[in-house]
Amino acid sequence: MTTLQLTLTDEIAKAAQSAGLLSSEAIEALITHAVKARQVDTFFSSLDRLQADDPPAPDTPSEADIAQAIATVRARSRNSTH
């Protein structure tokens, strides 16, 4: 178990106390949430760096290529049912 000592302005301390945020349980929940949020931010930052370092292969179809392929399949499907 770890003990923390906080120094807050009187205004923040009163607001936090009124909101029930100064209990051990509330502070633990706030810190737990902040740690998880930081982990998510770190994860997505890592993904961004990986994506920047590894651009898609040139043979990867673009959205326009995919849309054209879908349109072609739909057109063939309509033509073959009539």
Image: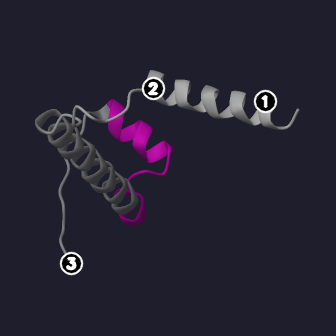
Q: Which residue is identified by label 3?
A: 1
For the N terminus, which image quadrant? bottom left
Measured as percent of width and height from the top left, residue 64 is found at 46, 21
Give me the C-alpha separation between circle 1 and circle 3: 72 Å
Badge 2: residue crowd in 10 Å (few <14, some 14–19, many ≥20) = few
For the C terminus, which image quadrant? top right
Q: Which residue is identified by label 1?
A: 79
Check if residue 18 falls in the magenta segment.
yes
Q: Nearer the viewer, residue 63 or 13?
A: 63
Q: Nearer the viewer, residue 73 or 45?
A: 73
Label 3 sits on what residue type?
Met
Check if residue 39 falls in the magenta segment.
no
Query: In the image as oriented, which residue stretches furthest toward the bottom?
Result: 1
Point out the stretch of residues depicted in magenta. Answer: 11-27
- The chief SS type of the magenta part is helix
Give me the C-alpha separation between circle 2 and circle 1: 21 Å
Label 1 sits on what residue type?
Asn
Left/right placement of residue 53 relative to residue 15 reads: left
Q: Which residue is identified by label 2?
A: 65
